[in-house]
Amino acid sequence: MMTPSDVKATLAFSDGSPTMELPIYKGSIGPDVIDIRKLYAQTGKFTYDPGFLSTASCNSTITYIDGDKGELLYRGYPIEQLAVNCDYLETCYLLLYGELPNAAQKEEFNHRVMHHTMVNEQMQFFLRGFRRDAHPMAVMTGLVGALSAFYHDSTDINNPEHREIAAIRLIAKMPTLVAMAYKYTIGQPYIYPKNDLSYAGNFMRMMFATPCEEYKPNDVLVRAMDRIFTLHADHEQNASTSTVRLCGSSGTNPFAAIAAGVACLWGPAHGGANEACLNMLGDIQQNGGVAKIGEFIKQVKDKNSGVKLMGFGHRVYKNYDPRAKLMRETCHEVLGELGLQDDPLFKLAMELEKIALEDEYFVARKLYPNVDFYSGIVQRAIGIPVPLFTAIFALARTVGWIAQLNEMIGDPEYKIGRPRQLFVGAKSRDVKPIGQR
């Protein structure tokens, strides 16, 4: 709920143009916002804010981040408490409906999701159109967009019942699609979902089981997977979430809007960061490993070297990423369970972590290891190939995208997104006949 502040902002111009009073709104927490909606009508001017770094594009009750404090809240609950006390589907319920479920609500919601996990059999034939070596995110953008062709009975974004069933379908079917994309690239048969398993357990089975033998899920690894999903479930108005909102603002169907989010997440600056981080570790490993880590750090500090440190620091968290602390625990738990503490790549990662936490250069710049650093290590330890990391991120973020999309549609102030521009090109001119050009 937007609360008007008693304080107003006054915009004054040095050329003597009339001043303008702008309303200020207070959030429940976080910075106040100056309402500039009438700016153009009253002054004929736009604001200029590339990347929207100082612009609130919506009001929201879903996720709050305080980057300076290193705080992340889903519907008011700290991520540290949710990751320890709730599983991913409880977190999904919270993001979608605003409150944590009681025992009966949890059981009913779990049943609904776990009984929508199968996808139309035609999806297998659709998959066959891709090359076997296609990047999983290329496959996922196609598969998620194609859902609207298979489930066109739930594509009316303005119908609350349609939105509800599309939400359940997307959350339920994303693990199946990611596992299918993986099995296709390695030439193994698809494993059908099993409704009596947990959400993360079912995903692990579809990923790693074969028809040759019974699959026994490892509880430590299933718990790690569930935590990865929970920590990535939503993250306020980031690039992919803003894309989903912008796409959905045109009235397109939920599957198409989520497919747009998947496409945006693919970028190395966004969801591809954990993939880029593991690739960086692989490069250091190839160039001499732990013995040569000092040389690598020297190159990172040299602005002219072009060498970037991936998986450290965060655009929003100016302090420690709260998700990283939780993922660090999981990382050590998984490496211990699998006996991988002496694996050369993991040793290298832990050495890099130690340097970043102690070296004055990194400490002064607050370049702490972020969630991508640890989740990449965990996923590789579990046996997930590096190109699939971003697809798993998309799977986890789907619920956040849907919650944000539904909130936008329910907001009486929502309009089709239409950013403005500062035009600096040629002014109006006449076309000359071709002989005179």
Image (cartoon, rainbow, N blue to C red):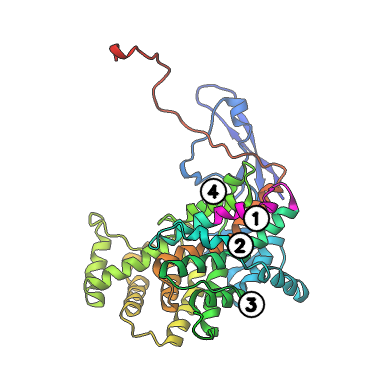
Residue beneath label 2, please? 120
What range is drawn magenta here? 144-160
Q: Label 4 crowding class (10 Å Cα cut-off): few <14, some 14-19, many 20+?
A: many
Q: Residue at x 52, y 60 (%)?
A: 125
Residue 148 in the magenta stretch? The answer is yes
Tell me the element at label 4.
Answer: helix
Are the two marked residues, 1 and 3, in contact with CB atoms closer than 8 angstroms? no
Considering the image in quadrants, where does the C terminus appear?
top left
Q: Position of residue 34 (x, y in %)?
A: 61, 41
> Is residue 408 toward the left or the right of residue 427 in the image?
right
Residue beneath label 1, please? 151
Are the two marked residues, 1 and 2, in contact with CB atoms closer than 8 angstroms? yes
Q: Residue at x 38, y 84 (%)?
A: 340
In this rendering, the label closer to the viewer, 3 or 4: 4
Q: Position of residue 282 (x, y in %)?
A: 30, 70
Q: Which mark is residue 383?
A: none
Q: CA distance from mark 1 to mark 4?
A: 22 Å
Residue beneath label 4, please? 243
Q: Label 3 crowding class (10 Å Cα cut-off): few <14, some 14-19, many 20+?
A: few
Tell me the element at label 2.
Answer: loop
Q: Position of residue 104 (x, y in %)?
A: 78, 75
Q: Quadrant of residue 23?
A: top right
